[in-house]
Image (spheres, rainbow, N blue to C red):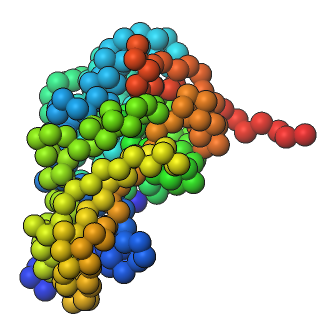
Amino acid sequence: MATTAEKTGEGALVDPDFRADVLRGLAATPRAIPARWFYDRRGSELFEEITDVPEYYPTRTEAALLDAIGPAVARATGKGRAVVEFGSGSSAKTPRLLSAIAPAAYVPIDISGDFLRDSAAELAQAFPGLAVHPVEANFMAPVPLPDAVADLPKLGFFPGSTIGNMTARAAVDLLRTMRDSLGEGAHLLIGIDRVKEPAVLEAAYDDAQGVTAAFNLNLLTRINRELNGDIPVDAFRHRAIWNADIERIEMHLEATRDMRFTVEGERFSMQAGETIHTENSHKYTLSGARVLLRAGGWTVLDTWSDADDRFALFLAEAQPHPMAP
């Protein structure tokens, strides 16, 4: 559910959840800020740039998979569904799915309102016969869907391996929330990145052009702009680290010198080498992904992976909960 923004003294709007998460995260040990706050307008634009850098394989791999499996998804789900995309961003991959399955409606859900409306308008132009109902909301909480799609069967779409940004517990909670939002009998097409060589993963999250670094550092710029901060952005550097024990890439902002700064009038200090943990990207084996989906209330119907076993798409169904003996 989208939160109500409040006005600062200068009249700018600020999300109270953003304020609370930042202040809590900067005071925590270790320091951490949820990755969902990357996505102001500039952050959303930078992420779209990331998907085009040579090292970032997930977008290209998933797009090719969607082209290949479109007919199979259409056969499995049937015509006339409402496609509900969680965290739609620019909806760059969505046309591939919509062209394949002939849906009755499209519901993009995203936390970045301006970006959401622009991309929804572009997609409506590309598919003039399709009803498009954008919803500005945080999809981590239950999202009431528009009345116009209430009676339509649903196909949830969650590409990009965004599920990997969450801990296993949070991922299961989200999958259950999606199940509740979409309803029993709904389908879910979800992208999940696979475990692979650390060097490939680290390069994908620390590209030579520095786009991912700019994306990470933009979080500090947003804090300064929206929360009256004076964080010295140039005193931080981007770090991407493979944590083999938990099978995830971690993104951090590392202080390059000792510093003091304020945010919303609260004072903080950091020493050189300290970090703010900003994102996780968990990677899964095929069996691990199936267990995750099952724990979230989804039964896997089919799985597709690329020839290099880098990325997988899963089609799952929200079947009735089985009676346990």
- Residue 241, percent across and down? 35, 50
Q: Position of residue 150 (x, y in %)?
A: 47, 40
Quarter location, residue 11: bottom left
18 w.r.t. 132: above or below:
below
Residue 13 can be seen in this image: no
| Relative to 167, 134 lies left or right | left
Q: Quadrant of residue 288?
A: top right
Total marks shown come to 0
Where is residue 304? Give x, y as percent.
48, 18
Report the residue at 19% width, 84% height from top: 260
Q: Is residue 29 left or right of residue 130?
A: right
> Split into 4 quadrants, where in the image is the C terminus?
top right
User: Which residue does the image show at 18% across and 29% down from the upper left?
Assistant: 54
Where 251 falls versus 107 (above or below)? below
Q: Quadrant of the N terminus?
A: bottom left
For the residue pair 151 and 287, the one nearer the viewer reads as: 287
Residue shown at the point (48%, 45%) measured from the top left? 244
Q: Nearer the viewer, residue 155 or 152?
A: 155
Q: Residue furthest right?
A: 325
- Foreground of the two, 65 or 17: 65
Residue 134 can be seen in this image: yes
**Image quadrant in which you'd find residue 27:** bottom left
User: Where is 259 relative to 287, above or below?
Assistant: below
Please report the residue visible at 59 percent of the width from the left and 22 percent of the height from the top. Answer: 301
Q: Is residue 135 left or right of residue 285?
A: left
Residue 67, given in percent of the width and then of the height, sits at: 32, 14
**Foreground of the two, 214 or 12:** 214
